[in-house]
Amino acid sequence: FDEIAELAVGNIVRRVLHIIREEDLSLLASKTGDLDLSAASDDEGTIDHDCDPIQSAAAAAAKSFLRSPSLHALLESMPDKALPSNIYTSSSGGDSEEKSKADKLARTRKLKHDVIEAINILIEDIDTCHELIAEQAVEHIHQNEVILTLGSSRTALEFLCAAKEKKRSFRVVVAEGAPRYQGHALAKELVGRGLQATVVTDSAIFAMISRVNMVIVGVHAIMANGGVIAPVGMNMVALAAQKHAVPFVVVAGIHKLCPSYPHNPEVCLNDMRSPAELLEFGQFSNCMDFGMDSRAPLVQVVNPGFDYVSPELVSLLITDM
């Protein structure tokens, strides 16, 4: 399931592999450039080393992609191989094979150092993505508006609180998000930080949506076609918003943007959880046909973890970039 539904994990892995390839290419290009420079004559024009396009591309990729803390820890735990003691004590005409081994080990150390440094930069990007998204809140939330949200999203929480800190006065309607009721936790956080929050049942969303100015939600993943994988119940909110022409705004970090298209997302990209979260085993007795075997209930409980919201229902995607 982790490989299918936890799409952000695959995104991070791909970006880290991309960083490793870019750093290796940059190091190879730098080494090649040094060889070319040493072979050139002294009277040739000087070479500008600050405009290397390959190194610039690697630096840009290192700052734009997100890194995995697990890979960072793995690289930190890898010990550097000890260099042979006779490499630095040999005479000026030392063996070329020993010199080649020393160069290889030095290159490996340099590559490891560059990759760890790039991963540290990108871990910082992951940690600050909520702040970068929240900085845009004042451009979208205006005075005396009513905002609807569903579920419990840290990104949505920081987005709303950032608007509050900019002296925006607005109300938040939080759908409780049954059966896990994450909306209750979000409402407590909002009230604790000075916002006006009202919790409503999921069945009241369609009745409330006509009074709402905007829907702001966090999501689990953003697919390549613009659709989103979100907590269960989100598709109902999006359909209600479309019916009443209410903007449906998604806030999510760029690391949740996936290259995959949602082929049969209700099945392939969903988390079918235990029916016991909704109905305990002992409660099945009320749903039995007494003319049949008493051990065979006639009710089938489906408990999906996510909803797929198609791209035509999404008005705006706000990311940290």
Image (tube, rainbow, N blue to C red):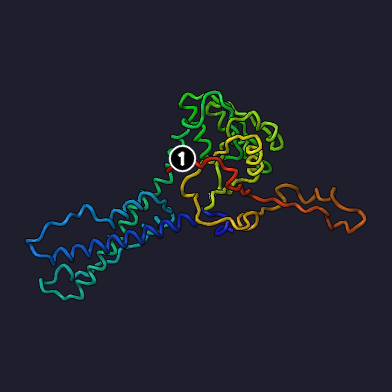
Residue at image location 52% in from the left, 28% down from the top: 193
Percent coordinates x, y for residue 171 in the rendering: 58, 27
> What amino acid type is highlighted by mark number 1?
His
Quadrant of residue 196 within the rendered picture:
top right
Judge left or right: residue 195 versus residue 73: right
Residue at image location 67% in from the left, 31% down from the top: 208
Q: Residue furthest right?
A: 291
Q: Secondary structure at mark 1?
A: helix
Quadrant of residue 129 within the rendered picture:
top left
Residue that label 1 marks: 130
Quadrant of residue 173 within the rendered picture:
top right
Q: Nearer the viewer, residue 163 or 213?
A: 213
Residue 201 against residue 105 in the figure, above or below: above
Judge left or right: residue 59 versus residue 238: left
Percent coordinates x, y for residue 205 in the rendering: 68, 35
Percent coordinates x, y for residue 58 in the rendering: 32, 55
Percent coordinates x, y for residue 17 in the rendering: 40, 60
Residue 313 against residue 96 in the figure, above or below: above
